[in-house]
Image (cartoon, rainbow, N blue to C red):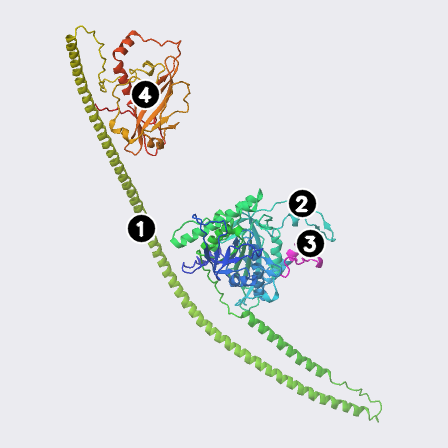
Amino acid sequence: MNRQAKCKTPRRPPPKKPPNSQRDPVGVYLRVRPLVAEDEECCIEVISSSTVQLHAPEGFKVNRNGEYKETQYSFKKVFGVSVSQMELFENVAKPLVVDLIHGKNGLLFTYGVTGSGKTFTMTGSPGQGGLLPRSLDMIFNSVGPFQAKRYVFKTDDKNGMEVQCEVDALLERQRRENNLTVPKTPSSRQKVDPEIGDMLKPEEACKADGVDEDSCYSVFVSYIEIYNNYIYDLLEETQEDAIKPKWNGGGTPVRQNTEFIPPQSKTLREDQNHNMYVAGCMEVEVKSAEEAFQVFWRGQKKRKVANTRLNRESSRSHSVFIIKLAQAPLDADGDNILQDKNQVSVSQLCLVDLAGSERTGRTGAEGTRIREAGNINQSLLNLRTCLEILRENQMYGTNKMVPYRDSKVSHLFKNYFDGEGKVRMVVCVNPKTDDYEETLLVMRFAEMTQEVEVARPVDRPICGFTPGRRHRNQAFREEMSQRLEDRGDAMSALNGVVLSLPPLPTSELTDPNDEITIPRLIEALQNRQRIRQMMIEEFNRAASKMKSMLQELDSNVISTENVILEQNGRLAEKDKVIHSNKTEIERLEKTTKMQEHKIDILQKTTKIYEDDKRSLQQELETRGHRLQRELSEKRRMEQRMQGVVSDTQHKWEKECERRVNAMQLEMQNKLWVKDEKLKQLKAIVTESKTPGRPDPQPRQTQPPPQRPSREERPSREERPSREERPPSKRSASPSPVPTTTPVRPRHRRSRSAGVEKWVDHKPPSSLNLGTVLQPVIPNAIQVSAPNEKALSKCDRYVLTHQEVASDGEIQTKLIKGEVIKTRGGGQSVQFTDIETLKQELATVSSRKRKSSEGAAASGNQTDGAWTDVETRCSVALEMRAGSNMGPGVEHHGIPKRRKP
């Protein structure tokens, strides 16, 4: 089963996520950019190494009450205007580079308003290198001596890394060099761009400690930009590279016909370890810091920048420079790289230069710039939303979904926030007062980001080989070469001795008496014998020396074998310990699985309980809402019933009062009849006593009108119209009304209290007829529309109404009434009298009535006029307090009550 699983997933399984206790907060650093002009107003004050204070500029009010508010913000470290690039690198980026060399990932990005110095912080300038060139320099200073040959490490298309032997790497190198269209000549070598020359000073070089010398390293770089929420590869060959002339075998350029091909956007994908990567992105293997920075600068020239009102070179895209460090251990001999893909460890460091947030009103953006600014602000807003939801989930234990996919920036760095490495942010701010509002928002976002915690990355496993293999192998090689040199010196000495024997003289005897040849031969032989003895002695010394060397070598071999045996014993003990540890680990894994199973059961039970609790809470809330609705309904019903009871009570009180008044009127009528009878009887008696005296004209008295009941009242159609009333001819006298004016004495003010005030209501549509007699109302407030303020100051009310009479002339009616206060705190008008003003021509005779109408009028003139005034004027108009309605809007048909 294990073999099948291994075949399906050849890569090492991802490490388990650490528990929640092993978390580190996001490191947020603040850097303040110096002002361009020294006399310019500053709104940021550095209080300490970790705190700054913002001062509101003049004319900017933070609170609603208009007071200036000074706010303080704390960060992990604050860098003032005098801080150098080296000090910033030592505190911010150096720990991330050390983690990269030790196999851990890291993310570093700059954030701030446009024109706050983000690109300078990340890239720098000649002589003041930023975080990126210093990181590259430190990486190569640390792993430079242990780099593998080019193409030993090879990237695949699935965010993985493969390793091949040196022979295959050499063949790969030759194949790629043969595919180059431009031959490598000394004149075609790239020269260092003067804009990036001397970025770092030699004395500022630094190196990481604790580098694993038993591993080989290789550095790969890639550079992308996120423009309008699309990903583009800045190292990909563009049209400018495509139209460059290619060279034929003779060394002459060949012109090619090319068409413009726009750059293709890249997509984000997820590898088998659930890490996000840019598919199809070009990764370049570099062997020095200068080469790496040259590659970066080649892509930097293709980045989208534009000139705005606030920044001459404003970044219009987010740039991401990815540094991948591949490392693999050496074999047991310490000579070659271990050819095992599972032992290859890849760590990466992302250096992100985010585009600055901006307001189009300040930058003066138009057209494409507005779209770019909108996409930049939207991506930054989505990044802020993701961090806020992460903080909420961590602080309150919620499980809200983080919207990583809403933006390419947040989606690309999803793994870092989920615990795949350290995250650090450098907030760049501009202290000028024009950026105060944007700086305030940046400060709030940075302070909130510090509360987000990221899981701490785990250490990569160490292979089981003996440490120090590379150093021992190198020392052994040096010793063997030294011994070979000593042995060669001895052999060369022996060869020199052998070659130094003198040659024998000629020994041919031509004469028996020759006494020279034989003594010469004897002398030569003796000389050779002496030299031979010297050679034997030298050889014996060399042999003894060689013997001693061999003995020493044997003793070394024996001691080495003893050490090997001792180490084997120790390894056996270690194997036993490892075996026992493995058994303990298996036991702990079984226990862990059992505990995890119990935890799953408890979690399911807890979830069921939580669901029940949530449903019960919802039911309780529903019942609570229902109870509140019932209580509110009950209160409304009580208020409604109280209103009905009060209205009914008021109605019956009015009805009782009306009946009493009717009874009083009936009794008054009876008394008047009796009085009339007595008067007539008295007149008869008087006439009988004075017979010669002419009869006086009988006095016409009018009985008080008897108020008809509701059943006896004529309907609106049966009542006489205004044209049927006998108008007065060119007179201002009032219309026929009863002798006793039907008013309410309890509402009439005393004459001694002062002169009554009138509200003279003349509508704007009234016409000036030019009559001689005009109504004069003293102490009157003239209004075109009645209002509460005028009615509250007066006691009487008069309405000037014009209408066309039956004969075609315009008649003016003055409808008078009294102003009465109501229970609600407002004023009501009760009409009591009508005066008519009419103008007639002398040639026009008044229209005569019919005999029946005249008889009815002559018989019931007084009663009909009284009834007409009573029915037409006994109407109250109520104006409530605080309302905008005037009289004539709300009518209460309450008959006027009179006292006898």
* Mark whose residue sits in front, 1 or 4: 4
Residue bounds of the magenta highlight: 174-198
- C-alpha span from label 2 to label 3: 18 Å
- C-alpha span from label 1 to label 3: 72 Å
Mark closest to the chain's N terminus, 2 or 1: 2
Tell whether label 3 touches label 4 (CB within 8 Å): no
User: Is 130 drawn above or below residue 628 in the view shown?
Assistant: below
| Horizontal side, residue 491 vs residue 711: left or right | right
Q: Secondary structure at mark 1?
A: helix
Q: Position of residue 768 (x, y in %)?
A: 42, 20
Identify the residue under disc 4: 834
- Relative to the observer, which residue lies in front, 731 or 176? 731
Identify the residue under disc 3: 182
**Callout 4: few (<14), some (14-19), or many (20+) C-alpha neighbours within 10 Å?**
many
Identify the residue under disc 1: 609
Mark closest to the chain's N terminus, 1 or 3: 3
Which residue occupies the extreme top position in the image?
Answer: 692
Taking the magenta stretch, the answer to whether it contains residue 179 is yes
Tell whether label 1 touches label 2 (CB within 8 Å): no
User: Is 553 drawn above or below residue 523 in the view shown?
Assistant: above
Q: Which amino acid is tagged 1?
A: Tyr
Q: Secondary structure at mark 3?
A: loop
Q: Which amino acid is tagged 3?
A: Val
Mark closest to the chain's N terminus, 4 or 3: 3
